[in-house]
Amino acid sequence: MLHTLAPLLFVLIWSSGFLVGRGVAAHADPFWFLALRFACVCVVFTAAALWARAAWPRGARRICMHLLAGALMSGFYLGPSWWAMSQSMPAGIMALIGALQPLFTALIAVFVQRKRLSGATWMGLALGFGGVALVLWPRLAATDASALSLPVVLLAAGSILSLTIGSMVQKSPWAAGDLRSASAIQNLGAVIVLIVMACIFGKAHWDNSPAVWGYLAYAVLVLSVAGTSLLIWLMRRGEATRTTALLLAVPPLSALQGWFIFGETMVMVQVVGFAVAIAGVALARR
């Protein structure tokens, strides 16, 4: 039952992250918000590990691998991607770039790890990416591509590559161990990276409104404690390409949530794209 429900629950949680990023922008600096978010997550997992008397990773190499996994999967992924959106990168473009992550994972698996992927997997990835493009097409058509800064686009793509490499590190035997203690160390790695980014690029902006604290609570408990834990759990128990293929369903579900919560319009091409993306995910995970 858990093996069936976990992927569905993960996609639903992960897809709400775009809505949180959109909501936080008006209330707080993204770097300081993210640094506080992962500091709180680190405290939660540390308390859980101590309460359960879980074993902690030992040895400098193992601890460094956990710090690296957290820095890549959270710090270098969310920090630059949220910054890119604050620099006029449309959320639709960011979501389309994010949909490249399963393809990056597949390419690393083939050319670095020397794995062989089936034709169905490649076809599923292509269908999934095509479906994402259809869902985002109305937003993409309204975007002036010439206004996009090449460095911002490259930084956004680099953030997705960081998530990909971090996911591969997560699969390493050196990053194994109890999920609670491992997550505490990994989130510490994210905090270190984000504090450095906040000191360099951040601004003193925090309006202390109930909304920003609500977003923080949701980001800590739902997006990180639940969502990231599910991602790590899925990565440890499945093949990386099959797991990351789930991320192709994130932009369509984000669009669906935006329609339901914010009243955003959905046209037929988006509905078709949603169906194509889900079919691609199902094919890639066969």
Image (cartoon, rainbow, N blue to C red):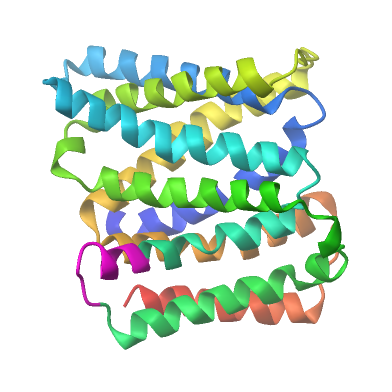
Position of residue 131 measured from the top left corner of the image (x, y, whole percent): 61, 77
Residue shown at the point (61%, 43%) measured from the top left: 17
Question: In the displayed structure, does residue 94 sit left or right of residue 204?
Answer: left
Quadrant of the drawing holding the N terminus: bottom left
Quick one: quadrant of the C terminus?
bottom left
Quadrant in the picture for residue 266:
bottom right
* Residue 88 in picture, x, y percent from top left: 81, 45
Along the viewing direction, whichever of 44 and 148 lies nearer the viewer: 148
Q: In this rendering, would 265 be left or right of 77?
A: right
* 40 in relation to 25, above or below: above
Query: Does the magenta portion include 195?
Result: no
Q: Nearer the viewer, residue 157 or 99?
A: 157
Residue at screen point 37% across, 53% down:
6
Residue 113 magenta-drawn?
yes
> For the view shown, which residue lies furthest in the front direction?
151
> Which region of the structure is painted magenta?
106-116
> Vertical placement of 227 versus 50: above or below?
below
Q: Position of residue 201 (x, y in %)?
A: 68, 23
Residue 1 in sight in this render: no
Q: Is residue 178 left or right of residue 234?
A: left
Specify whether residue 110 is in view. Answer: yes
Q: Quadrant of residue 216?
A: top right
Identify the residue at image location x=40%, y=19%: 42
Residue 94 figure quarter: bottom right
Horizontal and vertical percent position of residue 9:
45, 52
